[in-house]
Structures are given as C-alpha cells and as structure tokens.
Image (spheres, helix red, strand yellow):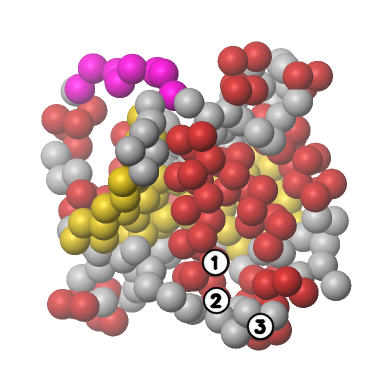
Amino acid sequence: MRYSRQTLLPEIGEEGQRKLQRAKVLIVGVGGLGSPIALYLAGAGVGTLGLVDDDVVGLSNLQRQVLYAGTEVGQPKVLCAARRLRELNDQITIHPLQTRLTADNARDIIRPYDLVVDGCDNFATRYLINDVCVEQQKPYVYGAIRAFEGQVSVFNYPPSLENAPGGKAKTYRDLFPDEGALSALPPLPAGVVGVTPALTGSMQAAEVLKVICGFGEVLAGKLWSIDWRTGRTNIFSL
C-alpha cells in the first residue's frame, strides 16, 4: 500500500490519511523551498496541490530546485513541477497556475484552498499571503532562507481568532510589523547552498502535515530557526 509506512504511525493512521486526501494546499513559489515542500506533500498523499509561479527553469536553479531536470531549462516551472509530481503520485490532483500572486488575483487563487505554504522569496508576496489568509481565516505556513540559515513559522493558526490563545493568532505582521521599512531594505545576498532550502522546506512540509492531521505541536506563535553550519536550532516565542 502506498501510504502504509505513515499510516502505521498512530499520529496519522487511516483517519489522518483520509484527512490528507481531502486536504487542499496551495504552494506559492516552486523554487528552492517549493521543491521539497511539493515533493513531500505529494508523496504523503495531500489530495490537491495548487502551484503558483510565473518563472521558468534556469540552469542556476538546478543546484537547489530538485523538482527540475537539466532538459527542462527554459520551461515554465509550474508545468514541469506538475509533471514531476504526477509521476511521483498519480492519485492526487495538481493545479499549476503559471502566474505571479498579486493583489488582483490573490483572493481568488487562495480561496479554494485550506492553507497556504510560502515558497516565495520576497517580502511583498509574504505580506500579501498573510493578509489574505487572515481575511479568509486560513493557516499560513511561512519559510525563509539565507545562505546557510532558515526559519519557519505557522501564522494565523488556529485561523478562527476567537479560538487562539489570548484571542488573536500570530501573523506575519507580528514577526515583521513595519512593512515599509522591510521593503526599503537593500536586496539580500543571493548566495545559498541547496541544503538550506531542503531542510527548511522539509520543515514547512512537516508543519503542513501536523496542521492537517492534528498531531504534535504546531509552530503557531513560534519561530523555528536553523543554522546548519553549526547544527544549532532554536525556537523563539513571537
């Protein structure tokens, strides 16, 4: 049986697998972070995956964006990603959206999904995801990387504000409240090792599984960070 190794776990079991099959998850960005996120969610049997990205595969992507092959350079990422994920698991539904998430389309794109996972690489898109998820009461699984470091959190969870501790779920704006100052910062150095998004994206996928199946301690109100040069990880309260 395809999912037998994870349904053996009491935290998942057959009921958890049914929850995964019913789940609809949107991944915004299928690059370095989006690659492991998409691969592991598809492998786990998440029933519907939406993929949003307007970029094409570049040669320099291949060092870390493990969804793609050298023969696909120049082709749209979402179409290549959808093809690879269907090869991995033909029992799930993939919706590739070859577009950039914008203020004009974000509400309509996000609305059909249960939660959103952040595979993007810019502050503006993260604020947009955050605000629409708050508006539509959906969890937002955040991830970001730089060089050898990564961080992950789960915002707007529980999505119903009255059910959150203290009556208000933490959001991306609690982590970075000054959007103007953040947007004005110079671009960060582009260097990154492929292991960094692999570790960080895998952690994001793990948080998605916890949210869907309802086990473990979700990183709600917390920020997990890793520096794999030293092997140190930390969890901070927001």
Q: Residue at x 63, y 57 (%)?
A: 41
Residue annotated with mark 2 = 213
Judge left or right: residue 207 versus residue 72.
left
Q: Residue at x 36, y 43 (%)?
A: 231
* Crowding at mark 1 (Cα within 10 Å: few <14, some 14-19, many 20+): many
Which amino acid does the dot numbered 3 rest on? Gly
Which amino acid does the dot numbered 2 rest on? Cys
Looking at the image, tell me whether mark 2 or mark 3 is earlier in sequence order: 3
Can residue 220 be seen here? The reply is yes
Stretch in magenta: 185-192
| Residue 141 picture quarter | bottom left
Residue annotated with mark 3 = 13
Q: Is residue 185 above or below residue 180?
A: above
Per the model, the C-alpha gap separating discs 2 and 1 is 6 Å
Question: Which quadrant does the N terminus fall into?
Answer: bottom right
Q: Which one is in front in this view, the residue at disc 2 or the one at disc 3?
A: 3
Residue annotated with mark 1 = 209
Q: Is residue 121 magenta?
A: no
Q: Secondary structure at mark 1?
A: helix
Spot occupied by residue 164 in the image (x, y as percentages of width and height) = 26, 77
Q: Is residue 192 above or below residue 230?
A: above
Q: Is residue 188 magenta?
A: yes
Q: Secondary structure at mark 2?
A: helix
Extreme-front residue of the structure: 230
User: How many numbered callouts?
Assistant: 3
Which amino acid does the dot numbered 1 rest on? Leu
Spot occupied by residue 148 in the image (x, y as percentages of width and height) = 38, 31
Question: Which quadrant does the C terminus fall into?
Answer: bottom left
Per the model, the C-alpha gap separating discs 1 and 3 is 12 Å
- Give the main secondary structure of the magenta stretch: loop
Image marks 2 and 1: residues in contact by CB distance under 8 Å:
yes
Looking at the image, tell me whether mark 1 or mark 3 is earlier in sequence order: 3
